[in-house]
């Protein structure tokens, strides 16, 4: 009986592990002294070979609870494999109007993600994503890191 239960647990474990695939790309940039200067522009190079698939792109920002703003504007600069460039602004809302955190708070760390779901890319090759902080101050304190995760959209 014990062996049968162990076998069932192992099979369930394999089934659950099989449901999630490894990310196509995952990297984060750690800010020295939790300080993001306007001069620092984290860069992420993602090699996309299969343009028939759709991908989710997730940018995750981690701050401390001492972060003094309710949001953070960023610019996402994208360079395609054929050299085209696009610069787009995005707002990452970190607090609700009542001051509570919108992201996942663990101790003194707050994690907030923005999602670009189900995106197909037109060309295969290396895409370069550069993220700039877009506020008027020359540096922002209490920013731990920012990361990019790219995953294939699961087939229906």
Image (cartoon, helix red, strand yellow):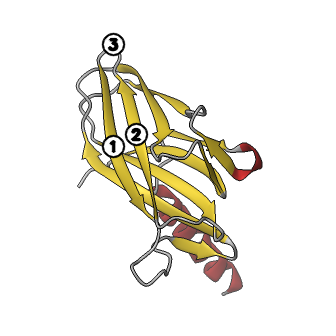
Can residue 24 be seen from the camera position used here?
no
Give the x, y percent position of residue 6. Answer: 66, 77
Rendered position, 56 above or below 82: below
For residue 114, the mark is: none
The residue singled out by tag 1 in the image is 89
Q: Residue furthest top?
A: 82
Q: Give the left or right position of residue 85, taking residue 14 as reference.
A: left
Residue at point 59%, 58% (across, down): 62
Question: Residue at left 59%, top 68%?
Answer: 110
Q: Which mark is residue 75?
A: 2
C-alpha span from label 3 to label 1: 20 Å
**Which class describes the residues within 10 Å of circle 1: few (<14), some (14-19), or many (20+)?**
some
Q: Residue at x 47, y 56 (%)?
A: 18
Tell me which label, 2 or 1, sits earlier in the chain.
2
Q: Secondary structure at mark 2?
A: strand
Name of the residue lying farthest toward the bottom = 1
Residue 84: image location, x then y, percent: 29, 17
User: Looking at the picture, does residue 24 appear above or below residue 66?
Assistant: above
Q: Are marks 2 and 1 in contact (CB under 8 Å)?
A: yes
Secondary structure under badge 3? Answer: loop
């Amino acid at each position: 009986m014990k062996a049968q239960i162990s076998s069932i647990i192992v099979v369930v474990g394999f089934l659950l592990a099989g449901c999630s695939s490894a990310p196509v790309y995952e990297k984060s940039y750690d800010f020295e002294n939790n300080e993001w200067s306007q001069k620092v522009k984290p860069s992420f190079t993602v090699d996309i070979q299969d343009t028939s698939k759709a991908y989710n792109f997730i940018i995750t920002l981690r701050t401390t609870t001492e972060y003094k703003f309710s949001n953070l504007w960023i610019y996402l600069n994208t360079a395609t494999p054929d050299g085209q460039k696009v610069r787009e602004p995005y707002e990452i809302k970190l607090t609700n109007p009542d001051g509570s955190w919108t992201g996942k708070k663990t101790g003194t760390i707050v994690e907030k993600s923005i999602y670009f779901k189900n995106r197909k890319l037109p060309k295969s090759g290396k895409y370069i994503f550069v993220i700039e902080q877009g506020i008027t101050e020359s540096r922002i304190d209490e920013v731990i890191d920012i990361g990019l995760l790219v995953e294939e959209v699961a087939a229906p």
